[in-house]
Amino acid sequence: EAGVTQFPSHSVIEKGQTVTLRCDPISGHDNLYWYRRVMGKEIKFLLHFVKESKQDESGMPNNRFLAERTGGTYSTLKVQPAELEDSGVYFCASSQDADQPQHFGDGTRLSIL
Amino acid sequence: LAKTTQPISMDSYEGQEVNITCSHNNIATNDYITWYQQFPSQGPRFIIQGYKTKVTNEVASLFIPADRKSSTLSLPRVSLSDTAVYYCLVVGGAGSYQLTFGKGTKLSVIP
C-alpha cells in the first residue's frame, strides 16, 4: 500500500508570503496528524483530525496556521503570512484508529527567507 | 503527558545486540509505550509498541517491567543500516493520541 505522501518536499518562500502544504494519508486512515520540527528543536504536535473534524488542535502555534481536511481524505496546512520562525520540517502522519501506530510521511522542509 | 528519558547517544559494533532503555516514571494507567526510528531526511518510522511484559516483532523486542516505569528496546544483531535516532514515547493517556517526541537516542553502528 502507498504510504503517507507529502507535497512539496521542499518549499522556499519569503517572509510575508503564503504557503500551503499538502498531506495524503494512507487510504482508509481516518486519523491524520500534523507535526513540525523547527530548527534545533524536537518534533512537536500541531493537530489531529478524525475524518474531517479537528479532534485536537492544541499544538497549533497561532492563527497564521490553518489546517483543513475537507471530505476527510487529504489535508492541507496553510501558513499565512509566513514568518522566519516558521522554518522547519512539517510532518504528516496517519493511523487507522487513534490508538493504532501513526505512519509518517517524509515531511515538507519549509524555508522562510 | 508522561515525560521520557533516554540516552542521548550509543555506539555499537555490527552484529551486536543493542538495548536502549527509556524511563517514564509518571506513566499513566492507560498509557502505552511506543518506539520510533528516524533516518536523516525521513519521517519517523514505527518500530514496536507495548503495554506491559514483552512484545516481539520481526525487527525488535520491547521489554516492559511490571511497574511500567521503564522500557527497553532490544535490536538483535544490528547492522550499519540501523544507524538512526530512536525515540521512546508514551501515548494515549486521557484520550490524547498526540506523540510527544524528545531528543531520542542517536545510535551509531560501527563496522
Image (cartoon, grey):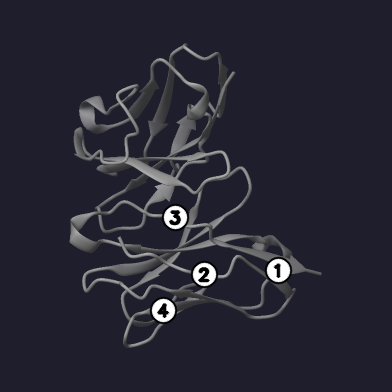
Instruction: Work out whether mark 3 precedes mark 1 in sequence or the reverse, and give the earlier one.
Output: 1
Q: Mark 3 belongs to which subunit?
A: B
User: Are discs 4 and 1 both within one chain?
Assistant: yes
Q: Is residue A36 visible?
A: yes
Q: Residue at x 39, y 33 (%)?
A: A24
In the rendered structure, which disc, 3 or 4, sits on the residue that comes first in sequence? 4
> Can residue A28 be seen in the rendering of this structure?
no
Quarter of the image holding residue A29?
Answer: top left
Q: Earlier in the sequence, mark 4 or mark 1?
A: 4
Mark 4–mark 1 Cα distance, whole angstroms, equals 25 Å
Which class describes the residues within 10 Å of circle 1: few (<14), some (14-19), or many (20+)? some
The residue under label 3 is B101
Q: Secondary structure at mark 4?
A: strand
Q: Give the residue at mark 2.
A: B6
In-front residue for pair A102/A96: A102
- Element class at badge 2: loop
The CA distance from mark 4 to mark 2 is 10 Å
**Quarter of image, res A4:** top left
In which quadrant is the N terminus of chain B drawn?
Answer: bottom left
Q: Amino acid at mark 4?
A: Ser
Q: Which residue is mark 4?
A: B70
Residue at horizontal 55 percent and vertical 13 percent from the top:
A14
Subunit that carries the residue with mark 2: B
Residue labelled with disc 1: B79
Q: Is residue A5 above or below residue A82?
A: below
Indicate the amino acid at tag 1. Ser
- Residue B80 drawn at (x, y percent): 73, 64
Residue drawn 52% across the image and 69% down it: B6
Q: Are marks 3 and 4 on the same chain?
A: yes
Q: Disc 3 vs disc 2: Cβ atoms closer than 8 Å?
A: no
| Front in this rendered view, residue B35 or B67 | B67
Q: CA distance from mark 2 to mark 1?
A: 21 Å
